[in-house]
Amino acid sequence: MWKYIRQYLFFAVIAGLFMIGEVMMDIIQPGIMSRIVDDGVLGVNNGGAPNLRLIWMLGLQMIGLVLLGGLCGSLNNVFVHISSQNIGNEIRKDCFCRIMDFSFPQLDRFGTGSLVTRVTNDITQVQTFVSLFVRGMIRTSLLTFGSMYFMFRLNLKFGLIVLCAFPFLVGVIVWCLWKANPLFSSLQAQLDSINAIMQEDVSGIRIIKACVREAYEKRRFGKANDELIKTQLKTLVIFAFMNPLTNALMYVVVTVILLAGSFEAGKGSTTPGIIMAAITYTTQLLNGILMLVMLFQNISRGVTSWKRVKEVLNSRPELMDGSFDGVTKVQGEIEFRDVSFSYPGSSQRVLSNINLTIHKGETVAIMGTTGCGKTTLASLIPRFYDADTGTVLVDGIDVRKYQQKALREKIAVAMQKSELFSMTVGENIAWGMPGAESTALKSVASIAQADSFISSMEEGYGTAVAERGMSLSGGQKQRISIARAVLKPAEIFIFDDSTSALDLKTEADLYQALKKSHPDSTKIIIAQRIASVRTADRIVVLENGSISACGTHEELLKSCRTYQDICHSQIGEEAECA
């Protein structure tokens, strides 16, 4: 954490100095009060005659010290917040940047809910930890040991009484923290679960309502929340017992001091003012210890949260950048050489011994049954994953040798699940190319068959899109996503079942316009419908992770049994296959 603290160490040091000033004002005052009682009110050193002038003088001095202490406390708060908030800000930005560099398997391992908790709640706990450490540790340490020091200066016996109780107080605190500390990790893990359920249910609210599963999801969320509250209550119960125990011990100390003070006063070896000051110091000591309890509680929770945040910060991207900047003569050629792949944590191969060359400007379709590896195969090209064995080449260069930015600038991807953001339609289309001219947006929207419905909207390309595109139909979202991909000056286009929500005529018009506007670009089309792929230069048929056939529509109708089955299953829709 020092990496972040040192950037704002100056503010933390200034905050610490002001805290020292505030505590010193608090520690000095019981001694002044002792003089007011003994010399001003009782006249112990003046033959029993009160000294009103001394009372006024010392009273004004106390008021001045209180005001000065309040000023120090306020300035301490200002500088503590400057340091802790900025430290939290730097950590949060670094965490988010690290998450943006994660590979897909890393994101899967952490989970969305857990990452949300770490970037929000955990970093807030770290901020609280920093501010309490700077403010609380100085205050409690000075207040505790300062009160003990002045207690010994007042009266040795009073100091020894407090010192005897100190081990018991520390024992209670240590025991409670030992019992509570393991619960903090459970609390954060349960927050992960709640955030994960929230994220899943909000994004999937339509299917929940369609399946009438609201009651089930309410119970699932309620169960996760009950577990969180149960753990939280265990923690609170531990500290609920600790505070009365420490209070009881300290009041026993006060009682013993009063008893000892009465004997001392009877013998004339102490005064009422000294007894009063001793009780005030004991109260300050009690407050210091109670603050120490709360401080250790928050520090323990902060340390637990820091460990979770550190897991994100210390995670290194699994897909390391190559050094190649992407400048080549051939543009858009793809080759798979003996490529095999299985997802992390699984021993089952999704792709086996794939050998395939896709030439520049060629349109290649990939078909096959669900789960045969179509999307996985396409995901290896922009290097969302790395092949286990074999090599994927783009323009004759292994994708692992590319700088990831340079590789992905060559490739535009449109997926079946259209990801739209809470911004205007035009801004969503220009997401990959910020600052694109309105004429360019209109042009690519026309290619994607989206211009007509966008222009019919009240605000056209300036129409705001609801979160995740909820204000648009599935086909509209897909066409906006395709327009976004087409706007990118890419050499390779990957359409991963991105026209599944379009009717056949709209889809045919889209591919015809794309072929006309980008004749030299390589196009990979993953689809389930024969009509989507029949005009492709070649169609690759995948079966159980291997290429079972490759050819034109007419060739596969004659030679590939799997393609024939797919075609005949769509015969009602695709009469031309017969």
Image (tube, grey):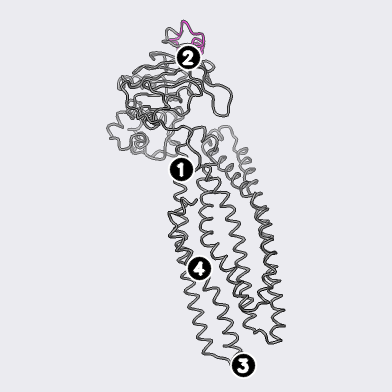
Secondary element type, mark 4: helix
Which residue is disc 3 drawn over? Answer: 48
What residue is drawn where x is 52% and y is 52%? 126
Residue type beneath disc 2: Val
Q: How far apart in space, not on screen, are marks 2 and 3 (Cα)?
A: 109 Å
Select label 2 or label 3 by which is in front: 3
Select label 2 or label 4 by which is in front: 4
Nearest the camera: 367 or 85? Answer: 85
Q: How far apart in space, not on screen, are marks 2 and 4 (Cα)?
A: 75 Å
Nearest the camera: 335 or 224? Answer: 335
Residue 96: which numbered mark, if any? Answer: 1
Question: Where residue 66 sits in the image (x, y, percent)?
Answer: 50, 75
Identify the residue at the far top of this view.
Answer: 558
Give the mark nearest the N terminus, 2 or 4: 4
* Magenta range: 556-578
Which residue is disc 2 drawn over? Answer: 541
Q: Which quadrant of the view contains residue 344? A: top right
Which residue is disc 4 drawn over? Answer: 20
Tags 2 and 3 in contact by the CB under 8 Å rule? no
Q: Which quadrant of the view contains residue 405? A: top left
Question: Where residue 401 sits in the image (x, y, percent)?
Answer: 40, 27
- Relative side of 326 to 381, left or right: left
Residue type beneath disc 4: Ile
Q: How far apart in space, not on screen, are marks 4 and 3 (Cα)?
A: 37 Å
What residue is drawn where x is 50% and y is 66%? 19
